[in-house]
Amino acid sequence: MTTSTRGTGKAPAVLVLEDGRIFRGRAYGAVGETFGEAVFSTGMTGYQETLTDPSYDRQIVVATAPQIGNTGWNDEDDESSRIWVSGYVVRDPARRPSNWRSRRSLDRELDEQGIVGISGVDTRALTRHLRERGAMRVGISTVERDPEALLARVHASPGMEGADLAREVTVPEPYVVPAIGEKRFVVAAMDLGIKASTPRYLAQRGCEVHVLPATASAADLLAVSPDGVFFSNGPGDPATADYAVAAVRGVLDARRPVFGICFGNQVLGRALGFGTYKLKFGHRGVNQPVQDRRTGRVEVTSHNHGFAVDAPLDRAAETPYGRVEVSHVDLNDGVVEGLRCLDIPAFSVQYHPEAAPGPHDATGLFETFADLMESHR
């Protein structure tokens, strides 16, 4: 990626999908060129949380909401230390931010962090194209005038299948988030691309959270004497994460309570013996309906995943760790959204219960984890 000065309303920009479809607009954020997987996010709010979510590493996000940037950029809502998306696509960028917490505009932040974007795009047409054809590689450029030349570079760029990205985004060194109020539990959390909100939610429930890198072994996780072990969200293909799968198995062997979300759900699934596969266009945004199969309750949930667990929906499966059932399903397409182990203390969901900036239907899963740790001390 090359970058220079902020390009809003200035330099022409072109977006080329790997199937050859072309969209033209204006530079938004940094001027330059970038490549990634084109995905769309359906959230009408929370773009700052989306852009700083490590799960979006190497993805170019198309905002389906027509106007973006109204609330600017603040210093409180980042979910990590930087913007992780490879590029950003918007239709109608706000001319100026208007929010009491705003410190600067969105396009200025994109420029300062070297994120190439494009505005003025018919994002509805682009979203419909991706919805029909599936997520695919894409390039955005403000320096290349020839779409065919850009398309050749798109075809040469890496895809998401086979991408081992958790090790790219993980924390380099362990750190501790202290419990808020009375300390009730110690939790070891593997950072596969963790969002800052997650340790805060655990801390609010009396957990002292030890966050360890994605390369931590089961011995490393168990060395902090945890009451439970958490496996976080993250980017990339779970089929590449053998190191995380081995760590999960070591924790399951030790019979410590396990809670996984998103990528953590996928590595738990692999540790139990299930396969994973790439979805056609994935689930992203803050309005995905998920049903708890045991209670029938439907929750509106926040997602960002392009892969899913391949587990049977019609029965409890026999695994090396006992019986496992699919606990949750997506009501849009029937994709597995959660696993529950019936003979050991472990469960997971494919979505984000911390869900910054919302919705908050699923925050009770942190209480479920606390109850599981309490009952298996």
Image (tube, rainbow, N blue to C red):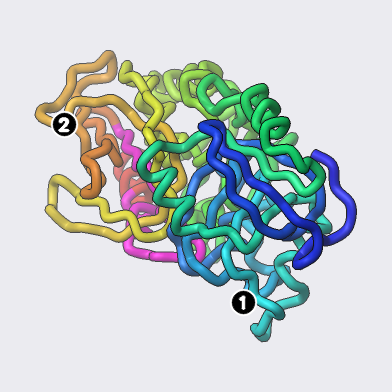
Q: Residue at x 42, y 45 (%)?
A: 129
Q: Residue at x 43, y 49 (%)?
A: 284
In the rendered view, would you say 14 is above or below 77? above
Foreground pick, 288 / 61: 61
Which quarter of the rendering shows the N terminus? top right
Tell which residue pokes out farthest to the left in this image.
314
Please tell me which of labels 1 and 2 falls first in the chain.
1
Q: Which residue is mark 1?
A: 70
Q: Which mark is residue 313?
A: 2
Q: Residue at x 31, y 20 (%)?
A: 274
**Horizontal and vertical percent for residue 27?**
74, 57
**Horizontal and vertical percent for residue 83?**
70, 51
Residue 205 shows in this picture: no
Which quarter of the rendering shows the C terminus? top left
For marks 1 and 2, give the CA distance: 42 Å
Residue 56 shows in this picture: yes
**Horizontal and vertical percent for residue 206?**
49, 58
Please rate how many residues cluster around mark 1, counting C-alpha atoms within 10 Å: few if below 14, some from 14 to 19, many from 20. some
Residue flagged by tag 1: what amino acid is it?
A: Asn
Q: Any magenta on residue 361?
A: yes
Q: Which range of residues does the magenta coloring cover?
A: 345-368
Query: Which element carries disc 1, helix, strand or loop?
Result: loop
Query: Which element carries disc 2, helix, strand or loop?
Result: loop
Foreground pick, 204 / 21: 21
**Horizontal and vertical percent for residue 6?**
83, 61
In the rendered view, would you say 181 is above or below 198? below
